[in-house]
Amino acid sequence: MNVKKMIIFLLIVIIIVGGGYTAINGINIGKYEINSVRDSLNLGLELEGGVYVVLEGKTDATGEELDKKMKEAKAIIDQRVNGLGVTEPNIVIEGDNRIRVELPGVKNAEEAMDMIGKTAELQFIDAEENVVVTGEHVKEAEPMYIENSSTGQNTPVVSLAFNSEGAKLFKKATENAMSKPAGADRVVRIVLDGEEISTPEVGAVITDGKATIEGEFTIEEVTELATLISGGALPMEMEEVQSSTIGPTLGLTSLDKSIFAAGIGLILIFMFMLIVYRIPGLISIIALTIYVLLVLFTMVSINATLTLPGIAGLILSIGMAVDANVVIFERIKEDIKSGKSLRASVDSGFKKALSTVLDANITTLIAGIVLFNFGTGPVKGFAVTLIIGVIISMITAIFITRFLLKLFIGINITKNTKLFGA
Amino acid sequence: MDLQIIKRKNIFFIISSIVIIIGIIMMFVNGFNLGIDFTGGSIIQIDLGKTVSVDEIREITDEFDSNADIIHSGDERNEIIIKSSEDFSMDERMEIFNKIKEEYDLADDEPIRSEKIGPSIGEEIKKSSFIAIGLATVGMLIYITFRFEFKFGISAIIALIHDILVALSIYAIFNLQVNESFVAAMLTIVGYSINDTIVLFDRIRENLKSFKKAEYDKLIDTSISQTIIRSINTSFTTLLAIASLYIFGVEAIKGFALPLIIGVLIGTYSSIFIASPIWYILKTKTK
């Protein structure tokens, strides 16, 4: 028995078991902390819970004009979502005229979406129905409290500061109002998306470009309103064409059960490999564990999102990783049966299996890359995990399985070819 | 092992043809059972904390959509899923939820799942998936032609089209719901079937030197018998993984595992019984 090789082999096993433990439970050594894969992995909404909505721009614009409007709309929605304080939102333009907004882990989906999809066109309209100032003239909008003159209580309001043009227009409008007799003629209506939110009566000419929106508001409502106004109006009306809310419990159950199911699946595969292929089976278990760890590590480091179709891609790639091992081991078995020595069989088996494994994986890889580039939504999620899985499966099958198998044979524990499945 | 696949090739062609023909007839007669992913519509899933009869819920939902599907869900059947072909907006869905919340005094403030899909979205997923699969097929054909030869490529692609047709037929015949996971199943078929076919073709390519043209039937049978254990073992291990998802997974995953199982089985079948015989025909009956 070769003790040196035995030690190397055992060390590798220990490192992999350690890696596996870290992936499942995370690790905390002094100031170094590694989160478990589960905590580090970006999960699709259907797995994590959360809300998404796809908004479609209602406009006749096409080509570059549409592009510009969509980018503008996206920027504004970005800002609104920031105002919500959601962690890791995902906002993307889909196709020509749609924007997908994904908010993981958000409760009160309805409120959040209400705010995001609002056009938020703010208008100040005088008694003669002229639009005197609009949201575009607003430089700043902030939530604040002012003392109500009649009740003495603090009420939440939105405080507005106009830009210089807005200040001029507002001054003119208030001058105009003050020239009218007190009462209905002095009223300036404040309208948001066609809905009247307050109707203050002008009490004096306002020259400093400041105004407040008062109403029956809670502090949450004025905060939301202020965010909407300072973000600006969407360049067009956006219609909800698709939306989904997955409660956090459903998401969590899905994830836990999927992890459990995947674990059981892996253990069954391991048992099968061990029973059918014995020593090479044991080696493939180590190689497949490395494979799974590498795939998870890659998913985390490139910040890929795991979705339900993504899980299908993973299963397919695990199938292909196992397949690569099976193809190699069957070749080795054949060569052992034809009377070659163990070492010679391993060498020739790998050599002959190489072209099979490469061709099979590269063909699948081509499919994966095309699907990634031309697919949308579910197809893309599938393609990402398939591409990662296939590349790593090739590497582990060709290099790691081979290295481990040769190392193990080098230990010289047994020469019994029956233990190699022959 | 003497498998005599080539001698019996017509049997396999007939089996596949029958499945596909019945499938196509069913597609025309019944159409597909399209899920809301494709037709557009809404889903609301609510945890009621107890089992409530469908009729009771229907009394509430009737005013919104009297044709809504209502089914129980969850381990203790404490949840209901309301499916409607109307695409209710988020506000409307909340209204339905709030009605039910009031009636059953629910603790939750929101449904556990609530979805709406506009009808045009499904159409686009369908279209883009077809284009993507089509282009992927062309890409694979080019690679196989480059690495093997054109006739191997064509045979592999015909087997692939066969797989997709059989899968569509199975969905039509058993009236299985065509939804987003169906797209994933199609993609899995593409990947799995081609992988399986390549492994077999690779062996045929290697054995090509030892057989004369007149012995191509033997060449194929030998190659299949040399790789069949590998095919069975690989399919079996992949099925182990998918089956455990089917048995232990949640609803959404279950709906997903079934088409994958179908995909793997068809993929394995076609590389042995369809792809190789077609290559044989192309090789011996054409120049």
Image: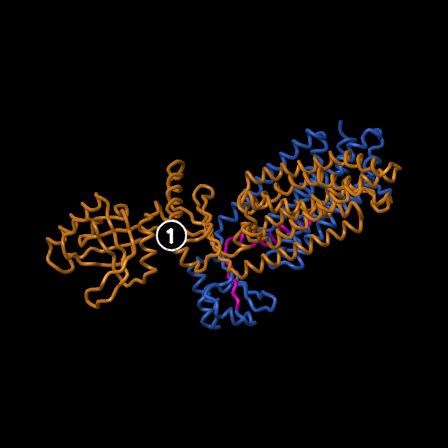
Residue B123 seen in render: yes
**How was the colour assigned to the protein in this rendering?**
by chain
Q: Amino acid at mark 1?
A: Gly
Q: Could you tell me residue A366's position as x and y percent?
A: 63, 36
Residue B20 seen in render: no
- Residue drawn at 47 percent across, 50 percent down: A88
- Residue drawn at 80 percent across, 38 percent down: A346
Q: In screen coordinates, is B206 left or right of A158?
A: right
Label 1 belongs to which residue?
A83
Chain hosting mark 1: A
Q: List the single residue furthest toward the top.
A: B287
Q: Could you tell me residue A377's position as x and y percent?
A: 53, 46
Q: In screen coordinates, is A371 left or right of A396?
A: left
The part of the image, by quadrant, that contains residue A295 is top right
Q: In screen coordinates, is A411 left or right of A22?
A: right
Identify the magenta region: B19-47
Task: Using the image as rendered, state which of residue A18 and residue A296 is in the foreground.
Answer: A18
Q: Could you tell me residue A218's position as x and y percent?
A: 32, 63
Residue A49 counted in the magenta span: no
Crowd around label 1: few <14 · some 14–19 · many ≥20 (10 Å): some
Task: Using the image as rendered, state which of residue B96 and residue A111 is in the foreground.
Answer: A111
Q: Could you tell me residue A100's position as x and y percent?
A: 46, 48
Task: Using the image as rendered, state which of residue B222 and residue B64 is in the foreground.
Answer: B222
- Tell me the shade of chain A: orange
- In the image, residue B166 sits, relative to residue A204, either above or below, namely above
Locate the C terminus of chain B and report the quarter of the image it occupies.
top right
Please give the letter of the chain rendered in blue: B
Locate the N terminus of chain B and report the quarter of the image it occupies.
top right
Residue B22 counted in the magenta span: yes
